[in-house]
Image (cartoon, rainbow, N blue to C red):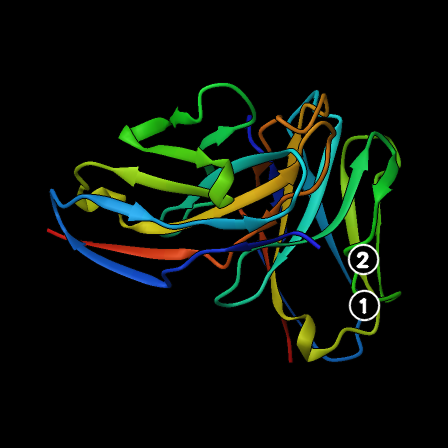
Amino acid sequence: GAGVSQTPSNKVTEKGKYVELRCDPISGHTALYWYRQSLGQGPEFLIYFQGTGAADDSGLPNDRFFAVRPEGSVSTLKIQRTERGDSAVYLCASSLGLDGTDTQYFGPGTRLTVL
Amino acid sequence: AQSVSQHNHHVILSEAASLELGCNYSYGGTVNLFWYVQYPGQHLQLLLKYFSGDPLVKGIKGFEAEFIKSKFSFNLRKPSVQWSDTAEYFCAVSRGGSQGNLIFGKGTKLSVKP
């Protein structure tokens, strides 16, 4: 499809486990963003890639969270030693990466539930 | 730090009523402003955006928003809502002049009664 895709759509895991969430951006988009949305809140920024490099990772809550984008396209968000507080919808967005007026196109999200 | 405030958590209107959703942001520099909408069961999509020029911007589906710099506001309006406008609406801001992340408000849920 032409939009941002994310897999899996739902992930249930146990406390302490490791999870990986995948994002496939729109073809040709150099900028990629990860956000987290908790119930009743707006999306909260986690990390932003321009190409392969993390241009801004100031939103990552702690060192259990890590993201990569090795070839400048698909990105993986990795969460180690998951905690119940990590339960949320994880959103990915991509944009052309030209400047701040670019529209960010969002994927459907991955709903993570930590039991 | 930047922040975005949306004044209404849940708004309930009848069809054909007029809509205004409030949004205020806190940042002293140049900003880009966005309204996103999330229809039930769908992902976030852009309604409209402002980055420069005419402070009254028009978006899809008859929505418009007005940037008032002196009030740090970017309120969303629609003269006559439809049942299909039932959704959650998010205001967002990014720093002007460079690529960067969006800061979102908490969202306003709009319910339109047929």
Report the chain holding disc 1: A
Q: Amino acid at mark 2?
A: Lys
Q: Amino acid at mark 1?
A: Tyr
Q: CA distance from mark 1 to mark 2?
A: 7 Å
The label shown at residue A62 is none
Q: Is residue B23 above or below residue A96?
A: below
Q: Are marks 1 and 2 in contact (CB under 8 Å)?
A: yes
Q: Position of residue B6 (x, y in %)?
A: 44, 56
Give the position of the N terminus of chain A as an image quadrant. top right
Q: Which residue is mark 1?
A: A18
- Asked whether, in this view, residue A10 is left or right of residue B44, the answer is right
- Asked whether, in this view, residue A113 is left or right of residue B18, the answer is right
Q: Say which of B52 and B109 sits in front.
A: B52
First-in-chain label (1 vs 2): 1
Q: Which residue is mark 2?
A: A78
Report the chain holding disc 2: A
Of the residues tagged 1 and 2, which is closer to the observer?
2
Mark 1: give few (<14), some (14-19) or many (20+) Cα within 10 Å. some
